[in-house]
Image: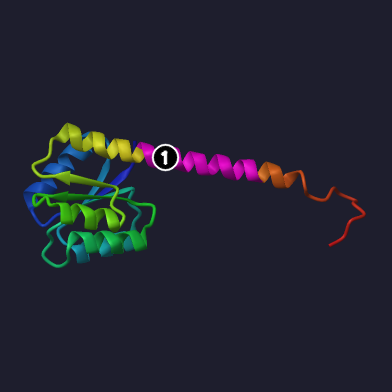
Amino acid sequence: MNESVLIVDDDAAVRKTLSSILSQAGYVVETRQNGKEALKAVEGEYFDVALIDIQLPDIKGVELLSRLKMKQPKMITIIVTGYPSVDNAIKALNEGADGYILKPFDPAQLLETIKKILDEKNVEKIRIFMEMEKGNRFTESFKKPKGSIFTG
């Protein structure tokens, strides 16, 4: 496993805890303390997953999620919050969040959630690849043979 995770949280203790849990599980981890730093990070590096605090000092987590998705559409985004509400959950899902984790979080549940979402995304990638391969085989049978009398 070499998936990379971007942790965006203004609380240093949360960043350190998440980083430790994910590093020990084999993920490559980067941390940022605010939205501005996170946006800068995704300009120069690809991340498989972003864990985003919903309450950041410079931008709302849901808005950051949307902006990160514009820069890296395939990145999995998970909102992490100590302020759960139905409104926050709906906003996060409407902006394309792949998950929603409550603080304080159970490390095992956190890892399970990330793994499950990554596995689902990988299955989708394989399905798309298989469909493309099927389409390529289909179009191969309609190509002109060499020396064909057909033109155009």
Residues shaded magenta: 119-135
**Amino acid, disc 1:** Asn
Residue at (50%, 40%) from the top-left corner? 127
Q: Where is the N terminus found, in terms of image quarters? A: top left
Magenta stretch containing residue 71, yes or no?
no
Q: Where is the C terminus found, in terms of image quarters? A: bottom right
Q: Is residue 53 visible?
A: no
Helix, strand or loop at mark 1: helix
Where is residue 26 shown, x and y percent of the image? 27, 36
Nearer-the-camera pick, 120 or 19:
120
Residue at (18%, 32%) from the top-left corner? 108
Residue farthest top in this picture: 108
Query: Residue tagged by mark 1?
Result: 122
Residue at (90%, 51%) from the top-left corner? 147
Q: In this view, does 36 lie above or below 80?
A: below
Magenta stretch containing residue 128, yes or no?
yes
Where is residue 90 shown, x and y percent of the image? 22, 54
